[in-house]
Amino acid sequence: MRAEYLLLMAACLLVTLPLEFWLRARVYRRPLRLLIALVPSVVVFYVWDAVAIARGHWDYSPDHTTGVLLPGGVPIEELVFFVVIPICGLLTYEAVGTVLQRGRSREASDA
């Protein structure tokens, strides 16, 4: 299926989305901070991919992508990956921090 990779990225977001609400990860609630965290890695890896594609180091199978190519020959799926995976990582990181903080607060109140 040509949209399989995009569906996988959507599933990654759906699996980690509850962390925003149940564990108050506060990733989506701070959009400027999220943007500041995403832009450097998205730019670096996008350029990296575009250069690697142009030099013939790697390519992407049209059988497994939608065929939508961005400047530099980078498939749209790759850009989505560069955005989604860091967001999922940030959600997980912030959620773990929240859980650890709650644990420390309970320990302090028990002492």
Image: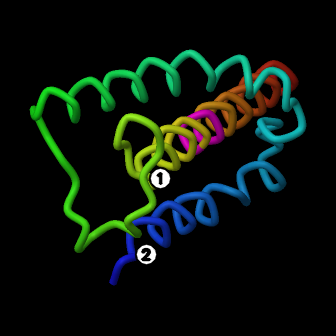
> The residue tagged with tag 2: helix, strand or loop?
loop
**Residue range (magenta):** 88-92
Which image quadrant for residue 49?
Answer: top left
In this view, 85 is above or below 9? above
In this view, 109 is above or below 98? above
In this view, 98 is above or below 68? above
Q: What residue is shown with label 2? A: 3
For the residue marked with disc 2, what is the amino acid? Ala
For the residue marked with disc 1, what is the amino acid? Ile
**Left or right: 39 as drawn, with respect to 65:** right
Query: Does label 2 or label 1 sit earlier along the sequence?
Result: 2
Q: Which residue appears at 37% of the width and 35% of the height? A: 72
- For disc 2, the neighbor class at 10 Å (few under 14, some 14 to 19, many from 20) is few
Residue 96: image location, x then y, percent: 62, 35
Per the image, is 90 magenta?
yes
For the residue pair 72 and 44, the one nearer the viewer reads as: 72
**Left or right: 79 as drawn, with respect to 72:** right
Q: What residue is shown with label 1? A: 76
Q: Which residue appears at 83% of the width and 43% of the height? A: 24
Residue 57: image location, x then y, percent: 10, 32
In three-dimensional space, the C-alpha distance between marks 2 and 1, rounded to whole angstroms, equals: 11 Å
